[in-house]
Amino acid sequence: MGSATFLYDGDCAFCSSCARFVERHIARDVMVLPWQRADLESLGVTAEACDDAVQWIDPDGRHSAGPEAIADIMRAGRTWARPFGRLLGRRVILRVAWPAYRWVSEHRDKMPGGTATCALPASERPGSPE
């Protein structure tokens, strides 16, 4: 594995908008991919984990999820984002960030760019395998 990978929910318009922002303004030498199009097995993550939260996979195979994954991509990102990644990655901040992440995740259909499809579990979205 050569570069780090950041996986997001490509079926969610809000998540896709956030991923585009990350690609344009934060990511540096990181593959930002919808998990539905990634080789999850080779990355060592499951569809269930990806449906639950964004995922970060280091080149050495270390995984993180949710706000910790966001902290990781920021720490590996452009210079301006690194201090924010270090701050977000602190345990005390993550204790607050996880409930906030869960709240946004549960309400992503109501976020800017969100659609009704964003509220559905991956298994119930149009075009998903049974």
Image: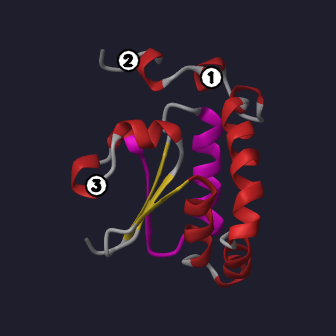
Quadrant (top left/top right/bottom left/bottom right) for the N terminus: bottom left
Residue 49 sits above or below residue 5 on the image: above
Which residue appears farthest toward the bottom when viewing the image? 79
User: What secondary structure prevails in the magenta region?
Assistant: helix
Q: Residue at x 70, y 62 (%)?
A: 94
What number is the disc on residue 101? none
The stretch drawn in magenta includes residue 16:
yes
Q: Residue at x 56, y 68 (%)?
A: 73
- Which residue lies under the disc numbered 1? 119
Q: Position of residue 77 (x, y in %)?
A: 58, 76
- Which coloring applies here? secondary structure
Q: Amino acid at mark 3?
A: Gly
Instruction: Answer with mark 3 or mark 2, whichever residue precedes in sequence.
Output: 3
Distance from label 3 to label 2 (Cα)?
Answer: 24 Å
Q: Amino acid at mark 2?
A: Gly
Callout 3: SS: loop
Q: Residues within 10 Å of mark 2 (few under 14, many from 20)?
A: few
- Magenta part of the protein: which range? 13-35
Q: Residue at x 66, y 80 (%)?
A: 82
Callout 1: SS: helix
- Which residue lies under the disc numbered 2? 127
- Which residue lies under the disc numbered 3? 44
